[in-house]
Amino acid sequence: MSDDRVSLIATTAFGLEAVVAREVKDLGYEKQPGRDGQIRFSADLDAICRCNLWLRSAERVLLEMGSFEARDFGVLFDQTRELPWERWLPKNANFPVTGRSVKSQLHSVPDCQRIVKKAIVERLKSVYGGDWLDESGPKYAVDVSLQSDLATLTIDTSGDGLHKRGYRKLTAKAPLKETVAAALVQLSVWNAERPLVDPFCGSGTILIEAAMLALNQAPGLKRTFAAEAWPQLDAKLWADARDEARSLEKPGPQHVLIGNDIDNEVLSLARYHATQSGVDDLIHFQQQPFSALKSHKPYGCLITNPPWGERLGEQREVEQLYRSMFHVLQPLDTWSFFVLTAHPKFEALFGRDASRRRKLYNGKIAATYFQFLGPRPPRRESPQAQAPMTNDQ
């Protein structure tokens, strides 16, 4: 393990900071004070590899170059130029600059991007010499974020967002991001010893993420990252991180996970995605309406992202579905239910107040995660609870 220390930021959708903070802690890194949507921590170089491979609910892993107050363009240029960009950017680095500005005097994002780019160029030219940089080498995506006049400069180590695991090559209507699906599972009380059903499974993302979690399978194991092309990170760091991930995998969940949906076409996508992720033997997908849901197994969990009824013509139908949920789920009196929806009157339609509620986002869409907690299972479940789940369960 390298002695070099780096400052990293795991970015996350609003509402999922606690989930990602726990993931970072589980990897052995100590969280530092941060802002909404960010988990900051200091670590060795190999953390870039391990965090990209392991973080289930983070959006990206950023390398923080520096943070400072900047209320005018001169300060932004000077402070940016003072940062040790040559530590990471080789002479031929390809470094596009993106940006954002919120509640800051420097509100022109294009101007901020141009000034940061110019400052980095001047810094690298002073180190490497020459009059120009050809940018033909590895990509180092630089970002300048201005929040209340505080400028934070980062380099993206992930490349594609971490929700792109590599298994979902086909998409369904209104897909749930893999990172959010993983968070829904982690925010529930489900574990590998309990039954799990998603009665509106769509393309299968919640169940696939649950299966990967039960296997302790690193979600990024089957994809590549931008920082893998960086000469500063020895290929052995990546190889060791992947070897570690494979060595930590566990046996599958005790019960076959069940996914139901009325759309057979979308179930075909779910089966394809499960096969691509290597968990197809752990999940049973079946075409079935919600009204037919039943199970003889106690202490199970239902985790689902049902239709939201965002389109005008769908709202009445969706509200009728929500009204039916109480009666359909009533026989599952030892189960816990976890429902993600943006409908503002879900609890009233369902006919029961949630035990807990959490505001979160799927992309840019605000939603609430309603959690209806059932009784805790006994320490040793009955033989009936341990029996294999059949297709109609």
Image (tube, rainbow, N blue to C red):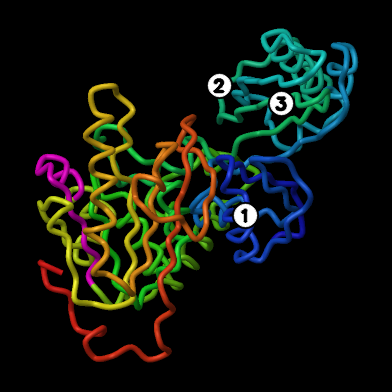
Residue 136's tag is: 2
Q: Quadrant of residue 294?
A: bottom left
Q: Pick the residue in front: 272 or 182.
A: 182
- The correct choice, above or below, for 187 with respect to 84 in the image is below
Identified by mark 2, the residue type is: Ser
Determine if the magenta segment contains residue 291: no
User: Residue 70 location in percent, x, y?
Assistant: 87, 21
Please state the horizontal and vertical placement of residue 370, each as a whole percent of the image. 45, 52
Mark 1 against mark 2, which lies toward the viewer? 1
The answer to whether residue 356 is left or right of residue 249 is right
Residue in the image at 31% along x and 49% along y: 205
Query: Contact, CB < 8 Å: mark 2 with mark 3?
Result: no
Residue 381's image quarter?
A: bottom left
- Residues 19 and 65: in front is 19
Q: Which residues are magenta?
A: 256-270
What secondary structure is marked by label 1?
A: helix
Q: Are marks 1 and 2 in contact (CB under 8 Å)?
A: no
Distance Cα–Cα, label 1 vs label 2: 39 Å
